[in-house]
Amino acid sequence: MPLLLPPPPTPPCAATSASSRRDPLDAIPRRSRRRRGGATTTASRTRSALSAAAVRDLLADDPTPRAFSALLKAAAASPRHRPSLLGEQLHAQAVVRGFLGGEEDSIILATAVLSFYASRREPGLARRVFDGMPRRNAVTWNALIKGYAQAGRGEEAILLFRDMKRQVGGDAAPDKYTFPALLSCIGREGGAGCTQVLGGALHAHVIKAGLEKDPFVGASLVSMYAARGTLEDAKFAFDQVDSLDPIVLSSMISAYVNCEEEEGALLLFLSMLCQGIKPTEFVYSSVFSVCGRMSILEMGKQVHAHSLKSDTEKDAAMRNALLTMYSDCGCIDDAKKVFSSNDNLNVVSYNSMISALGQHGYLKEAVEHYRQMKLAGLMPDDVTLLNLLSAFNHAGLVHEGLQIFNSMVDTEGIKPMYQHYACIVDMLARSGQIGEAMKVINVMPFEAEAPLWRIVLGACSKHRDIETGEHIAEMLFEIEPYEATNYILLGNIYARLGRWTEAEKVRNLMDGRGVDKDDAFSWIEMGQRTHRFGVDDRSHPISREIYGNLDRLISAIKVAGYVPDISFAAHNIQRDRKEESLYYHCEKLAFAFGDLVAPSGGTLRIMKNLRVCGDCHCAYKYFSLVTRREIILRDNKRFHHFKRGSCSCGDYW
């Protein structure tokens, strides 16, 4: 059934009366905003950025506490990387003039000073101002709590909330601005430490305060639960909100994405459109991510078209998500078009494009984009270098990759992180330099985690290094006794060496420990529907025709030179049936279906949840030769573009 999106809602009239918009700088008395010899007024200066001239004008005009407050708000709103000296000078002048007393205006000014320090990630200084205040209101408490939360000091923020609750009087009662900051810091910690049980407790406080229906608080609750991976709790918080606020809907869609419930995200997005609610850029970005992750190209195209019709402002994050979506669906040319149409390229844009090109095997273009990025005056970051290293890794260019890695600190000023070392280990191991890969593991300033050891074990399987493979496998069996991949990789080493007895022992060890491996499956989108196939799957309505076409294709590619590699057959199959079992791998069934129903010579895009096996990779090259089709296969590591009997990976993956 086609996934047709409803038309975008008609944008509401944007015209707004000027009198209905209140400028926060209106709090500054008129005399402090008058012109002097045509000079820019203090108020107009603070609208863009706080300047020394604005401070001089203020001090010359005999300012009031509220004028100081307005300028401190402008200082707090300026980018954090700018010096905070002017804000500190304003604080000093306020102290000298005796404005920080006990009156109402002084509470407003002290709160502005506190908020300024909190915005600069200096909660300690903000706390000193707070402790010196004879009176405090909810705004003051909220500003300090938010400062600690944004600085990553969640436990202290929670303790402040406790003290706030204990205050006598209604002026300092927690309100809808108190809880979002607390919930966000708990979400960032992912439920770790002493905050693990506080999410539910804060939710209870929200309900007790009667704020569970507030969209701002509700969105924060949903985001907090999503960050902790508790989707059911996120749904409960979402259902409590008595609103169709776009921010709340965005949070719930993000929760589905974070918890890998892609279908839930799509259904909520469609419900949002049907109710005439205009999606935000963040919502579109999330849905693009879902479409890319699920490789549902037609849906992605429809969402893209809808975003264009809805006149949504194309921010950088949304464009980058769109680029990645097309890349993840195998449409690298469309990804390039999205990149080229972006008039506001930033580091993230280049990172997305370099990553996409590397995954599709376009190393030269990835390097060229890296060069263009530097020519544009953009500084590469650690993600840029990781994507570039990954591109060299996929291409098997070990020497060039090592050059990039060794120049990270000296040339780019970037300290290698764990992921960079892991990429180098993978690069060396897959090229057959397993000993060198082990040396890197031993000298890197990080302790190797199980996935990195598994990378080396996979390389041992590829290069038939039984001694190292057995050593690593024994280590992994102890660390992760129920991870099926570890057993499969060791069994593959034995199989490739023809040691079927040892391979069978590994299989029996898996069974004895109750370890189940992930089932392999492939899928192909055809006719606005997704068709999924497992190994030896006969559940499709036209299964008989699919198997008939596959038998015909196997005969054709055998004539062309294809020789089945039985080392990739399952270990527990009798030897005389191993070759036949290879024919019915899920990716071969998906191709046979696509070849059967798609127009002759058309491109087929096929996805697989696991890595493509060597026999299927070989068969796909012959499929592209005998059918004259281009085949784009995405496995869980990278893309393979098969054309006229060859693959873009150069048989190196």
Image: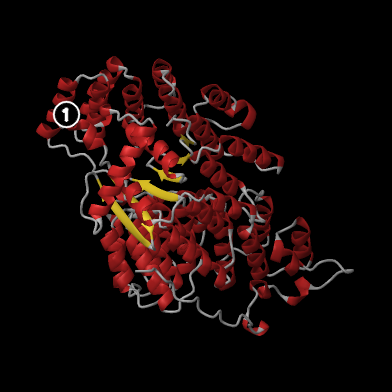
| Quadrant holding the C terminus | top left
Q: In which quarter of the image is the N terminus?
A: bottom left
Residue found 57% across the figure and 65% down from its top: 101
Residue 270, visible in the rendered structure: yes
- Residue 75 image point, x, y percent: 65, 58
Residue at position x 31%, y 39% in the image: 554
Q: Quadrant of residue 505?
A: top left
Q: Residue furthest right?
A: 37
Describe residue 568's horizontal placement relative to residue 172 as left or right.
left
Is residue 37 shown left or right of residue 603? right
Q: Name the residue under label 1.
A: 576
Q: Which of 353 and 148 is in front in this view?
A: 353
Residue type beneath disc 1: Asp
Residue nearest the observer in this picture, 624 or 572: 624
Q: Name the side, left or right, on which 536 lies relative to 589.
A: left
Q: Does residue 448 sit above or below 187 in this rendering?
A: above
The residue closer to the viewer here, 311 or 118, is 311
- Is 553 situated above or below 578? below
Quarter of the rendering containing residue 206: bottom left
Q: In this view, does 198 lie above or below 413?
A: below
The vertical placement of 371 against 433, above or below, is below
Q: What percent of the width, then of the height, locates residue 360? A: 50, 41
At 24% across and 59% down in the image, what residue appears? Answer: 541
Q: Dot 1 lies on which element?
A: helix
